[in-house]
């Protein structure tokens, strides 16, 4: 393998994660119950929208070529996404805050929260695939002397 073959694979993995993240965004925004707005729902929506922004930036970088600088720039965005995902979507505290925040607001909100949690879980596998592809890119960059060959 080489950087030129690994970067397109990374780009494909990021595109698959972007698709999963867009599905999560639909759940968070369009499936949200109408009426009372809850701060916890706004927090989740902000985290998901930020995640889409990180993914869009990473895709733009990867579409720009297979250089180490582009891979690094994409990696910065992807790491920001991973941190946001871990802290605001998957952590015990985040899930607990979500469930406490919807308490007492009816079955529609419980259903929405369950869908949000499930949607977040569906992003775990594509996120790991991105991480694995990124590690392969770094391996090839270092094997090729910084990607200069």
Image (tube, rainbow, N blue to C red):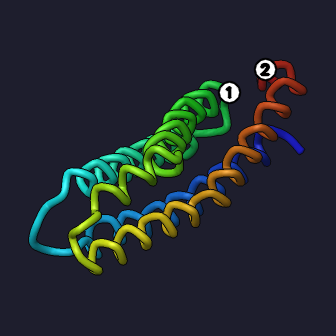
Q: Using residue 99 as the reference point, say whether residue 32 is left or right of it.
A: left
Going from the N terminus, do you reach mark 2 or mark 1 first?
1
Coordinates of residue 149 in the picture (x, y in percent): 83, 25
Q: CA distance from mark 2 to mark 1?
A: 7 Å
The residue drawn where x is 43% and y is 47% is 94
Q: Residue furthest front?
A: 104
Quarter occupied by the N terminus: top right
Residues at marks 2 and 1 touching, judged by CB atoms closer than 8 Å: yes
Give the number of marks. Answer: 2
SS type, badge 2: loop
- Within 10 Å of disc 2 (Cα), the crowding (few <14, some 14-19, many 20+) is some
Q: Is residue 93 visible?
A: yes
SS type, badge 1: helix
The residue drawn where x is 90% and y is 26% is 143
Q: Residue 105 is drawn in which quadrant? A: bottom left
The residue drawn where x is 85% and y is 40% is 2
The residue drawn where x is 36% and y is 63% is 25
Q: Residue 137 is drawn in which quadrant? A: top right
Q: Using residue 140 as the reference point, say whether residue 93 is left or right of it.
A: left
Q: Residue furthest left?
A: 35
Q: Is residue 19 visible?
A: no
Q: Using residue 130 as the reference point, say whether residue 120 is left or right of it.
A: left
- Within 10 Å of disc 1 (Cα), the crowding (few <14, some 14-19, many 20+) is some
Q: Name the residue carrying label 2.
A: 146
In the image, residue 17 sits, relative to residue 60, either above or below, namely below
116 or 49: nearer the viewer: 116
Coordinates of residue 130 in the picture (x, y in percent): 67, 49
60 or 55: nearer the viewer: 55
In the image, residue 49 sits, relative to residue 105, either above or below, namely above
In the image, residue 74 sits, relative to residue 146, either above or below, namely below
Label annotation for residue 68? 1
Coordinates of residue 76 in the picture (x, y in percent): 54, 29
């Amino acid at each position: 393998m080489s950087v030129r073959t690994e970067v397109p694979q990374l780009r494909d993995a990021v595109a698959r994660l972007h698709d999963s993240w867009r599905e999560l965004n639909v759940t968070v925004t369009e499936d949200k119950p109408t009426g009372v707005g809850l701060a916890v729902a706004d927090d989740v929506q902000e985290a998901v929208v930020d995640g889409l922004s990180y993914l869009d930036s990473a895709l733009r970088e990867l579409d720009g070529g297979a250089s180490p600088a582009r891979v690094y720039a994409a990696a910065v965005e992807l790491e920001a996404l991973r941190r946001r995902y871990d802290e605001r979507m998957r952590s015990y505290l985040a899930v607990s805050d979500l469930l406490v925040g919807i308490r007492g607001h009816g079955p529609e909100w419980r259903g929405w929260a369950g869908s949000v949690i499930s949607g977040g879980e569906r992003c775990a596998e594509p996120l790991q695939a991105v991480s694995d592809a990124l590690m392969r890119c770094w391996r090839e960059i270092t094997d090729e002397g910084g990607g200069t060959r």
